[in-house]
Amino acid sequence: MAYDWGAVSSSSDLIQNLLRKSAVYGPVIALIGIYVVFSIVTDRFLTYRNQLNILRQVSIIGILAIGVTFAILCAEIDLSIAQMTEFTGVLIAALATGMYYSTTVPVPIAVLIGLGAGVSVGAIAGYITSRFDVPSFMSTLAVLFLADGLSLIVSDGRPIGGIPDSLQVIGRESVAGVPLIVLFFLSLLVVSQLILSYTRFGLYIYAVGGDRQAARLMGINVMRIRFAVLVISAAFTVFAAIALIGRIGSANPNMGSGLLLPPIAAVILGGTNLFGGEGNMIGTLVGVLILGSLANGLNLVGVGPSGQLVAQGIILMIAVLMNVFARG
Amino acid sequence: MADRDVVLEMKGITKTFGEIVALDDVDLTLHRGEILGLAGDNGAGKSTLIKCLSGAHEPDSGRIVFEGEDVTIENPREAKALGIETTFQELALAPNLSVTQNVFLGREETQRVLPLVPIMNKGAMETRTRELLSDLEIGVDPDKRVSDLSGGQRQLVAISRTMLSDPEIIIIMDEPTSALSVEAAERVLELIERMRREGASIILISHNFEHMRAVADRIQILHTGRDVGVLDVEEATRENIVDLMVSGTLEGRGGDDSDPSISA
């Protein structure tokens, strides 16, 4: 016979379960709430065209948010994403427009070099954090400055125009009416969620994020996982840079402004535990959509950018409180 | 007993933390298929010693001989690769993962969907965990999160983790019965006996002499970071253990000379 160990305490269990469920379903309920309210207030909100518009507007923040989700799930953070987007963006643009060589570098090669450079710089932060146990908010802060400087050096401080059409495809074209940038974002999201759900690497991110010391004692190569999440986050800045180049039709060393905090806010809005170990990419999608639909809806009813920021600040504050309370 | 097959030896292990000498030239011998108790007061160095074996600490000096060969154990992964499994006092489990995920963590079963993509075989792992838990008569739901389990349940999950691999391994258990109910502690002792029957060699740290005497073959005592004697379980009366733990010698019994079973 199996021993019956009894429930720890059924009433506190119940409360804990409810709170945990609220961390999972709270963001979805908030998103539904936003949709219901704006659908009632304005008939321009819930149209196919406007929904595509929201998706297109959030795609770049969304791509960066996916990368940051990997880091936050592992109890790390990446503060360099905006400047890394600038650096890799101007590097790819500079190579593809022939800023350095008499002949232009073919776009696929330019993209590969950009990816290599982004991953390499991300690896510096990853190595410093995983090898020497430097908190990632410090190592990636250092990379923020480094990438900012590199993007000014690479671009010579000037916008880069004359971007080849093939480099602008993702940010500009559509397939059957759906912007490629949206499909790009959603494909990255799906692949990332599959990695989290079905691979050992994905599981180890949760294990390390939940309790780094226990994960080490259980035989996980914690250093490798911490290194990898920061490299992945850097790789996603390259994806975002490619999408952004097509969207704005050029590259410049300030193209990442405003791209640091919204992705991090979206991850937290999506219910991913601030301290790692819990959350997923679906949550991040919900978080990105909360930010996007709120701004879009307020815009439609005539609330300007300043009012939108206030609303986002309030929503984020509620989300952070729930994030902490839900996990005791 | 002395000619029994030696599976593991630690020789002259010394470990300091800054000014503090946690272990001073400590030896330990583990025979195949035995349960070696490790006793000592708080701060005597028991946990530090086994952490040198499980890869959580690296000794400053000394040798570890495993199956006749010198080995270095720099991290827990290397210990596991040798077949040394540990359940730690602070219960190293991932609180945010399920029982199944904890049982398999670090050695997940995978299958390939596309030639190059290995994915976890969740179904197989859950089935295997269910079998293991039911075989060990542990009534815990494999899908439950570890953070929702009681202390006793967590201890049993930690033990079942060690039982997943090859049974002929070395298992180190640091205070597996502390903070458990009487019933739960008895379950754990039964499991320890069972693991030994199935071929494991076990080092057991405990503050509870009765638990240790119930299952151990020999009991080694540490005193302020030094190795002060090994008693066969028949000689390991409460008084003898306490004497060695407190003073480092068997007072009034002739001290070291007549100490019956000090092994090298």
Image: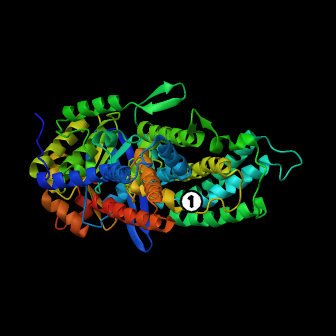
Pick the quarter of the image with the C terminus of chain A: bottom left
Asked if one can make out residue B58 in the rendered structure from this viewpoint, the answer is no
Which percent across, then down, holds residue A324? 32, 62
Name the residue at 80% across, 48% down.
A97
Pick the quarter of the image with the N terminus of chain A: top left
Category of crowding for the residue at label 1, using alpha-carbon neighbours closer than 10 angstroms: few (below 14), some (14–19), many (at least 20): many
Q: In which quarter of the image is residue B178?
A: bottom left
Asked if one can make out residue A45 in the rendered structure from this viewpoint, the answer is yes
Which percent across, then down, holds residue A54? 49, 49
Name the residue at 47% across, 26% down.
B112
Which percent across, then down, holds residue A209? 41, 53
Chain at numbered mark 1 = A
Q: Name the residue under label 1.
A: A259
Q: In the shown orientation, is residue B103 left or right of residue A83?
A: left
Q: Please identify the residue farthest to the bottom as the structure is shown.
A: B19
Q: Which one is nearer the viewer's eye here, A323 or A232?
A: A323
Q: Which one is nearer the viewer's eye here, A316 or A214?
A: A316
Q: Please identify the residue farthest to the right as the structure is shown.
A: A102
Name the residue at 52% across, 65% down.
A137
> Which amino acid does the dot numbered 1 rest on?
Leu
* Colouring used for the render: rainbow
